[in-house]
Amino acid sequence: MIASTSLPKTMRAVRCHAPEDYRLEELPVPVPQPGEVLIKIDACGICASDVKCFIGAPLFWGDNSRKGYVQTPVTAGHELIGTVAALGEGAGEKYGLEIGDRAISEQIVPCWECRYCKTGRYWLCDVHDVYGFHTATQGGMADYMVFPKNALNYKVPFNLPIEKAALIEPLACSMHAVERGKIEFGDVVVVAGVGTLGLGMIACARLKNPGILIAVDMNEGRLNLAKTLGADVVINPSITDPVQAVKDLTEGYGCDVYIETTGHPEGPNLGLKAICKGGNFVEFSVMKEPTTTDWTIIGDTKELNIYGAHLGPRCYPKVIDYLNRGLLNVDGMVTHKLPLESYLEGFHMVHNSTNSIKVLLEP
């Protein structure tokens, strides 16, 4: 192992044990094994999925119809950025990293053995070890963490401020969702739900130069920020009927591309009404509960193209490059920075989501 200096023996970590049972604990600092990278965390964002896990959503903890996803105890957090503190044998050469470099790791650590990994679709890995949810991939809400030997790691320029570097993970997810929408010149594009990920989708979709880019959200502050990031039109459903508004902008046809990221069970139904025949519908949301819809709309009525979007495959290098060159506007997305010990305050802040967008924990 190559280390920068003498590392401390222990560290703090936010550990998930059960719904609403998250504890700040003292743990040994991991020692990187061959192929592994030890990172000193600079910042870790709180994702909406972290909050859904915290409040006990069935997707994470299971119910009568499904098995839960999360394994415990596990250190939470996957929206991380940090500095290389130590390198296991061969890791520096493998990833092009040196002690002191700023680095990031894709949120999923593929097994590289399942059908999906072997056919290049590593983000759909059957094992699906994602940082902060599985015990094999401990997360970034800690002073230190390890990138395992199977991880996908990237060097991040130091000239990127922490507020931007910490957004690489959610922006990669946003970029992937936008790519799935197959936006063409002149398209009318709707992004429904403009939290961190939706705002990232607005910023990425703007680079595709659609005909009209529309943001839909109940929060006026987020809609105002969406305008600065590139939205041409903003719609608050508590004030304006979004379906009618979209049809009014499209001679009654509806939008060409609809990206659904509200996380609300009724969100997909609104989108199916607002999209035109033959349109591209992208579903990104992590729902806290199942939703139902009229599948006749998808098939016989509109013959829609339905695309799921999961994680941010192959987008990290592009996001890093675009941020570094100033092509991707994310100003204003980080609204709060809290010390690690204030993690509960941060979780509740994101859950209430009234006055916050992206909340960072800084050890």
Image: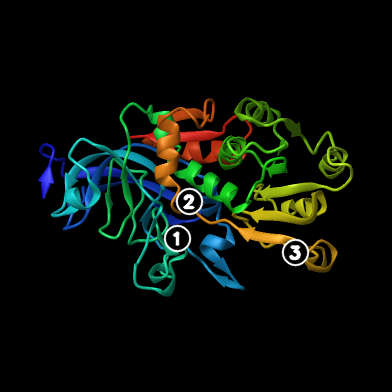
Which amino acid type corresponds to the residue marked 2 in the rendered image? Answer: Gly
Q: Is residue 28 above or below residue 237?
A: below
- Disc ID at residue 312: 2
Tell me the tag on residue 123: 1
Label 1: element kind: helix
- Please give left or right for residue 162 compared with residue 350 in the image: left
> For residue 324, which quarter of the picture?
top left
Q: Is residue 342 visible?
A: no
Look at the image and tell me in which quarter the C terminus lies.
Answer: top left
In the rendered structure, are the residues bearing label 2 and label 1 in contact, judged by CB atoms less than 8 Å apart?
yes
Find residue 3 and report its horizontal and vertical position in percent.
Answer: 12, 42
Question: Helix, strand, or loop for circle 2?
Answer: loop
Outermost residue, front side = 185
Tell which tag, 1 or 3, sits nearer the viewer. 1
Earlier in the chain: of badge 1 and badge 3, it is 1
Dot 1, crowdedness within 10 Å: few (<14), some or many (≥20)? many
Q: Position of residue 4 (x, y in %)?
A: 13, 38
- Residue 292: numbered disc: 3
| Residue drawn at the location 39% of the way across and 73% of the way down | 114
Front residue of 262/111: it is: 111
Give whichever of 146, 253 is nearer the camera: 253
Label at residue 180: none
- Dot 2 or dot 1: first in sequence order is 1
- Report x, y in % for residue 274: 80, 49
For marks 2 and 1, give the CA distance. Answer: 8 Å
User: Taking the image as drawn, is residue 117 in sight?
Assistant: yes
| Relative height, residue 351 to residue 265 (above, below) | above
